[in-house]
Amino acid sequence: MKKHTSGFLNLVEECKRDIEETNVDAVRYRQLEGEYLCLIDVREDGEWERGHLPGAIHLGKGIIERDIENLISNQDAEILLYCGGGYRSAIAAYNLKKMGYTKVISVDGGFSAWAARGFPVEKPL
């Protein structure tokens, strides 16, 4: 497991106080119920290529704030963000909330928790 710096962890905790979170079990349940989910993977390109949640869209943390409005113009749409462990997605959720998106949710545990549960993973063609 990656060791994060205290400054980064403090930033994540500050963001988490102002956002909504869910977990991978709730996401998988909603998928199995046939619910459409707007899942956005905010990880780096190489991480995405190694595998991602089924049906996810890739908008890396470096570009999501720049490109989100072109992809999702409805600021009231529910958007689920995930990364490797739930830290980068929390920061991205915080930023999108500041941009006016009202239903942005970070998936705590991210891809690591998803894979650890043995849930299905897609890979790009």
Image (cartoon, helix red, strand yellow):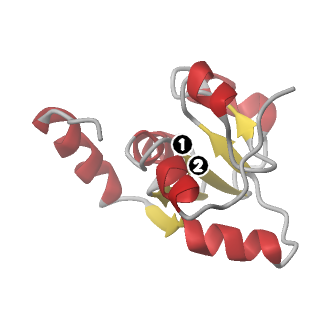
In the image, which disc is placed on residue 96?
A: 1
Identify which amino acid the numbered label 2 is placed on. Leu
Could you say where residue 44 lies in the image, as x and y percent from the top left? Answer: 55, 24
Could you say where residue 107 lies in the image, as x and y percent from the top left? Answer: 52, 58
Q: Nearer the viewer, mark 2 or mark 1?
A: 2
Secondary structure at badge 1 equals helix
Q: Residue at x 33, y 56 (%)?
A: 16
Q: Nearer the viewer, residue 5 or 7?
A: 5
Q: CA distance from mark 2 to mark 1?
A: 10 Å
Q: Which residue is under mark 2?
A: 81
Could you say where residue 39 lies in the image, as x and y percent from the top left? Answer: 70, 50
Verify CB contact (< 8 Å) between mark 2 and mark 1. yes
Is residue 12 found left or right of 84 in the rendered image?
left
In the image, residue 8 sits, relative to residue 17, either above or below, namely above
- Label 2 Cα neighbours within 10 Å, binned few <14 / some 14-19 / many ≥20: many
**Residue 91, image quadrant:** top left
Identify which amino acid the numbered label 1 is placed on. Leu
Q: Does any portion of residue 105 appear in the rendered image?
A: no
Quadrant containing the C terminus is top right
Q: Residue at x 61, y 20 (%)?
A: 45
In the image, which disc is placed on residue 51?
A: none
